[in-house]
């Protein structure tokens, strides 16, 4: 293997960006993706980075308010600020960055990528705080954080109460697969200015309980163990939101729906723990 972009995790990263763009989830430079490398992937990457001089150490958060000490020394592949998902597949080195955190988890340096300059996504601090939560909660299994702007879900944030329970029940009721794919439910963050510490903290608190968190009037954050599962969660939730909006636009009150007993039966059949608070 001669090129860094030939590594399997890089190819999967690029593929998710391409699928998300084709789905219409990433207008202009909207959305972002990050991947937390395993030790084996770091070892596989090092020989392909020889001769490259790392960039300077830079604050994870421009205000210096964010640090993830438990991830000190870890590596992340992340989309760049102001970069377009549609460009990741044909000019990867200009569109993404391989970043290393220092031991404090408060600073990063670019090891590869952002060829023409720039920074990781403006929501890098949100990604890292969520990575810290999910890495701990999953025993290191969850390594993908994906943020996108699916239109139907954003529309739903204007007409459904901005609570975890209201969103979970509305989405679960659309398709039997929903409580199978996200049995823990879905979290909701009321509108906040993106890119800052406040929204990062609010999202990471919800990630203690959920794998998917809605940002009202903005989009969705997904945490997953694989790129396929991250995209699968995004697609499922957006399809469910589209069905919700179709039902609401009909102007008619639904005549049927899945009961609480039905949700419990789904959980029993597929091994998901359905939280009682949503029933």
Image (tube, helix red, strand yellow):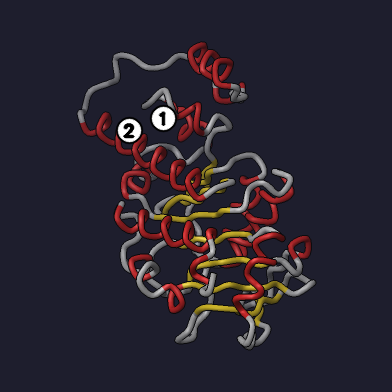
Question: In this rendering, is residue 56 above or below 124?
Answer: below
Q: CA distance from mark 1 to mark 2?
A: 7 Å
* Residue 171 location, quadrant: top left
Mark 1 crowd level (few <14, some 14–19, many ≥20, 10 Å Cα):
some
Q: Which residue is mark 1?
A: 170
Question: In this rendering, is residue 136 above or below 165?
Answer: below
Residue at the (32%, 46%) spot, across then down: 155
* Residue 157 location, quadrant: top left
User: Percent x, y for residue 76?
Assistant: 61, 66
| Dots 1, 2 in contact, CB < 8 A | yes
Query: Between 201 and 16, which is closer to the camera in this rendering?
Result: 16
**Taking 124 as reference, is 42 left or right?**
right
Question: In this rendering, is residue 252 above or below 91?
Answer: above
Query: Between 189 and 128, which is closer to the camera in this rendering?
Result: 128
**Taking 61 as reference, is 192 left or right?**
left
Residue at the (60%, 76%) spot, across then down: 48
Tag of residue 244: 2
Q: Check disc 1 and report its element: helix, strand or loop.
A: helix
């Amino acid at each position: 293997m001669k090129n860094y972009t030939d590594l399997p995790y890089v190819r999967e990263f690029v593929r998710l960006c391409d699928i998300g763009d084709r789905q219409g989830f990433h207008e202009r430079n909207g959305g972002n993706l990050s991947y937390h490398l395993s030790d084996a992937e770091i070892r596989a990457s090092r020989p392909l980075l020889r001769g490259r001089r790392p960039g300077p150490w830079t604050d994870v958060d421009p205000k210096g308010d964010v640090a993830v000490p438990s991830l000190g020394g870890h590596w992340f592949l992340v989309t760049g600020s102001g970069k377009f998902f549609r460009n990741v597949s044909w000019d990867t080195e200009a569109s993404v960055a391989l970043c290393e955190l220092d031991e404090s988890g408060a600073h990063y340096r670019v090891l590869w990528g952002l060829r023409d300059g720039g920074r990781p996504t403006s929501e890098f601090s949100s990604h890292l705080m969520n990575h810290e939560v999910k890495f701990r909660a999953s025993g290191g299994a969850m390594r993908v954080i994906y943020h996108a702007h699916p239109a139907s879900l954003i529309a739903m944030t204007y007409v459904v109460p901005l609570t975890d329970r209201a969103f979970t029940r509305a989405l679960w009721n659309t398709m039997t697969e929903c409580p199978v794919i996200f049995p823990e439910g879905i979290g909701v963050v009321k509108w906040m200015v993106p890119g800052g510490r406040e929204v990062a903290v609010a999202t990471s608190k919800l990630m203690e309980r959920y794998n998917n968190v809605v940002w009202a009037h903005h989009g969705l954050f997904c945490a997953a163990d694989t790129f396929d599962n991250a995209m699968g969660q995004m697609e499922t939730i957006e399809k469910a939101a589209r069905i919700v909006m179709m039902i609401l636009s009909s102007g008619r009150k639904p005549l049927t729906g899945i009961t609480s007993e039905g949700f419990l039966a789904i959980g029993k059949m597929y091994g998901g723990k359905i939280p009682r608070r949503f029933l």
